[in-house]
Image (spheres, rainbow, N blue to C red):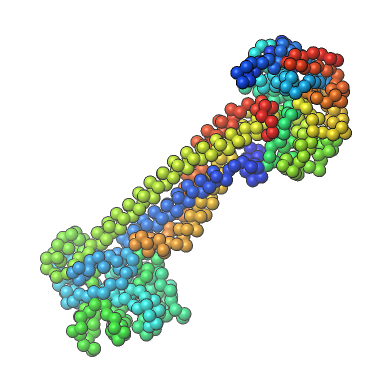
Amino acid sequence: MRIIDIAIRKLINGKTGGAAALIFALILSFTAFSGRILSDSLFLGANNLKERLGADIAVVPKGEEESYQGIILSGEPVECSIERSLESKLIAIDGVEKVTPVVYLASLNASCCSVPIQIIGYDPETDFVTTPWISEGYVKDNKDGSLIIGYNIAADSEDTLTFFGRSYEIRARLNKTGTGMDKSVYVTFDVMEQLIKDAREKGVSFGEKDDITETDRITDSYVSAFLIRVKEGYSPDQVTGTILRDIPAGVVQSKNVFSSVTEGIGVISDFIRNITIAVLFIVSFVTALLHIYRVENRRKEWAVYRMMGASGNWILELIFTETVLLSIVGAVAGVGLGALVVFPFSELISEQLKLPYLRPDLLEIIKGVLFSIGLTAFSSIIPGIIAGEVAAGTECYVLMREGES
Amino acid sequence: MSIVAENIVKEYKRRGKSFIAVDNASFTVPKGRIVAVTGRSGSGKSTLLNILAGMIEPEKGSVNVDDINIFGVKASKRDKLRAGKIGIIPQNQSLISGLTIYDNIRLQSIFLSQRPFLPNSSFSGMVSVLGIDDLLSMYPANLSGGEMKRVAIARTLTGNFDYIFADEPTGELDKLNSEKVMALFRKEASAGKGVLVITHDDLVSQSADIIYTMEDGRLKRKK
């Protein structure tokens, strides 16, 4: 029989008082694992956001700068419009490489629409933000449909979605971004024209003015925003300055959206790290006390081992093995509990935090599992040694003197 | 070769007053013999056993185990010496909960790595004589006091020690089982081992080769 066999049998069959230590290990592991996955998901979401923003600058109606951030980060519907005629002025600004207009139209939470979401119209002729993500391997099928849907959009049966009483076929689904883009549907301006007209019949608009006739193409007159890519050698700050001076519109720089996101993530990440460190210290301290209590209650058992010829080191090793085993079992349970909380509720967490949130890949999750179990096992080393030293110091005459073992 | 104790004095303090548990006791446990120490409760018998086994240090006197003064060496060496030579059957329950009876018996062998475990036939014979062969897969919590005592005896006997110290080995046993245990001790003595039995039981003491009585810490040879 090896020490580990004895330790396992004792923990399974004997009254060793290990349950409390196991629960504390579970708490530490749960905190470490769910904290790490949460933190990783936020950073991953932020990095993805940086890649997916595509444009350096968004030109929006004055006063709608915050609404634009809401669309990007959480897919919050917005109702605003800006004159399409500004497009030619923007492209003429020194330092502007590309300009593309977008229209944001909110669907209804009513029988006419499958889902209440943000529909984003893009101009295929000038678009450099949406199209690249479709052409880079995100097309799930080759249907000649009208809609490109975000990752979190649930399609109706037969791959269609209905908006304002009309059914549209889905052409492609984008990969998960962990941002508001996952809850959006992308359409070309041609499709958007039809949507806007249907929406107007239902009393919905994206904020366009009423000075347009039934025969006009609405997107020729009004759009929701312009997305701009800055030429190499120019800074977004330079171009922003020119826009604010020459164009009657508001400006949102992608780097500012990103920095406000990373700032928020930094605060949360620091909080998670501090909580984990605090829990680590508390658990180590309490676990040490629990293990000392456990070994004190089993003094006669140590005396029996000593009487049979066990060395102090052997007893220390047994206690240490028990302690580490308890912490590993607790850690595995903590990781399992963490996974049950973090993964099924990731959408809810994302919505509550209003930050980009993207689940890490399997390798990162495995790293998180190993980190949490390793940290929890590490936290049991000192308590294990302290408790082992206490037990190893037991003299065998305790058995003779104290009666029942 | 034997265990020789000379002029042992052990004093305890109880409620601020000191009293002598063992008073100038000299004593020998020769190999090949059964030695019994009898006496009333509290007369100092168990203290004497603990001193002879090197588990309690006396105020005065010496204990030589096969010519080695066990209180003249470091505690760690003393522990090793005891573990290698003396098998102890304590008065009280000494089985490890959570381990089966078989594991409890085998446990002794992991501390005696130099010594092989009993051959299967000897092991089976011994557990059969002690009437615990049906208990091997059970746990200590399911056993009676007498059964636990017999398991503790089996555990010590599997260690193949030079000396066996038994503190009230028949305390919780019926007459038949007591006789079986003494027969096993006799077999051990015949194999050249020294057996020390602390007992209240006249039946047990009468089957010993040498009998001492202990009264108020003083030891007298009776037989």
User: From where the camera sits, is residue A54 visible?
Assistant: no
- Residue at the image position 72 percent from the left and 19 percent from the top: B44
* The C terminus of chain A lies in quadrant: top right
- Residue at the image position 56 percent from the left and 31 percent from the top: A390
User: From where the camera sits, is residue A87 visible?
Assistant: yes
Please tell me which residue lies in front, B122 or A201.
Answer: A201
Vertical comparison of A223 with A45: above or below: below
Vertical comparison of B1 with A215: above or below: above
| Occupied quadrant, residue B138 | top right
| Occupied quadrant, residue A261 | bottom left
Q: Position of residue B159 (x, y in %)?
A: 75, 29
> Is A158 left or right of B116, judged from the image as shown?
left
- Residue at the image position 62 percent from the left and 17 percent from the top: B17
* The N terminus of chain A lies in quadrant: top right
Q: What residue occupies the far bottom of the structure in this picture?
A: A215
Q: Position of residue A237 (x, y in %)?
A: 18, 59
Please tell me which residue lies in front, A268 or B20.
Answer: B20
